């Protein structure tokens, strides 16, 4: 990926020459179908594409790509507070170790750009309003189905995720849904996609944008992950049209 135009390349940045020295064909595909094709498709804005990409590389712990992609995300309009919150959110949806790997990279990018803690979301802040009725329905359904299997998981899902994390204002609900769906596709977690894709579309993600996520993810998580999600997303789209 190309480095930021306003800052020197991050440490560990892979250059075009590096790629060419190992695989001239990969350099060709990177410059053509990826950078001059995928990133210019109209379904998603450059900011959204950066959000999707950052979610994918964190979900898959692709640390070699993180420095350039985190820098690119900031250049594409993702605010430092939003990048910080993406990492926090994905600790729950991709794992703590994945988030800590991203922390190590983001720390260097933030230092390079003079981004201080005053620009980042606080640990505790006033939460967004909760849709009490919808959350009660979700919590009741999950508790009925799984409360006897893992009461701790059910309790934490309600208290930590849906009554806390999802209500933090540093990311808009649509953006939280966007990165959650992206991480699920990238990690092949197809069983979780229907709920979160429906939630994403309820939060404002259009079908065209969701389709664009799948096209984009194929390059960063591989075609098998994208194709595994394809029939699941098709089913969601068809059911919402009825």
Image: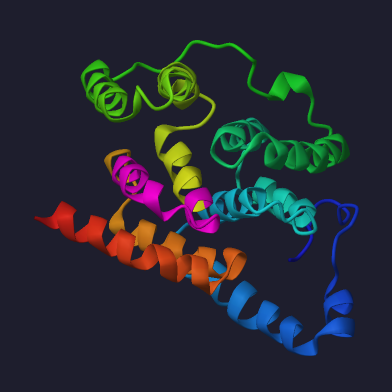
Q: Residue at x 42, y 41 (%)?
A: 177
Let me know if residue 40 appears in the view.
no
Which quadrant, please, contains the C terminus? bottom left
Q: Residue at x 43, y 25 (%)?
A: 150
Let me know if residue 107 appears in the view.
yes
Relative to residue 173, is residue 188 depicted above or below? Answer: below
Frontmost residue, 137 versus 56: 137
Relative to residue 156, is residue 204 depicted above or below? Answer: below
Relative to residue 4, is residue 135 depicted above or below? Answer: above
- Expressed as whole percent of the image width and height from the top left, the position of residue 21 reads 90, 83
What is the residue that sits farthest to the left in this orientation? Answer: 242
What is the residue that sits farthest to the bottom in this orientation? Answer: 25
Frontmost residue, 120 versus 219: 219
Q: Is residue 61 left or right of residue 133?
A: right
Q: Residue at x 31, y 66 (%)?
A: 231
Q: Residue at x 83, y 77 (%)?
A: 19
Which quadrant, please, contains the N terminus? bottom right
- Expressed as whole percent of the image width and height from the top left, the position of residue 218 reads 53, 69
What is the residue that sits farthest to the front in this orientation? Answer: 148
Q: Is residue 194 magenta?
A: yes
- Expressed as whole percent of the image width and height from the top left, the position of residue 91 reads 62, 34
Frontmost residue, 79 versus 166: 166
Q: Which residues are magenta?
A: 183-200
Q: Is residue 238 left or right of residue 195?
A: left
């Amino acid at each position: 990926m190309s480095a930021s135009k306003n800052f020197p390349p991050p440490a560990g940045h892979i250059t075009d020459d590096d790629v060419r020295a190992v695989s001239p064909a990969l350099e060709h595909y990177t410059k053509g179908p990826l950078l001059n094709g995928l990133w210019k498709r109209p379904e998603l804005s450059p900011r959204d594409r950066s959000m999707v990409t950052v979610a994918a590389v964190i979900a898959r712990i692709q640390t070699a790509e993180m420095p350039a992609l985190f820098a690119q995300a900031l250049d594409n309009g993702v605010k430092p507070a939003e990048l910080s919150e993406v990492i926090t959110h994905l600790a729950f949806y991709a794992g703590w170790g994945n988030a800590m790997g991203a922390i190590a990279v983001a720390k260097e990018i933030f230092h390079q750009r003079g981004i201080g803690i005053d620009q980042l979301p606080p640990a505790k802040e006033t939460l967004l309003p909760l849709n009490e009725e919808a959350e009660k329905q979700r919590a009741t359904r999950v508790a009925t189905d799984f409360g006897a299997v893992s009461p701790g998981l059910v309790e934490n899902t309600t208290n930590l995720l849906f009554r806390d994390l999802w209500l933090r204002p540093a990311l808009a609900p649509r953006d939280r849904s966007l990165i959650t769906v992206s991480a699920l596709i990238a990690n092949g977690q197809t069983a979780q996609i229907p709920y979160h894709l429906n939630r994403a579309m309820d939060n404002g993600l259009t079908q065209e944008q969701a389709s664009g996520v799948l096209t984009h993810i194929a390059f960063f998580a591989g075609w098998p992950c994208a194709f595994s999600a394809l029939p699941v997303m098709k089913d969601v789209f068809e059911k919402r049209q009825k």
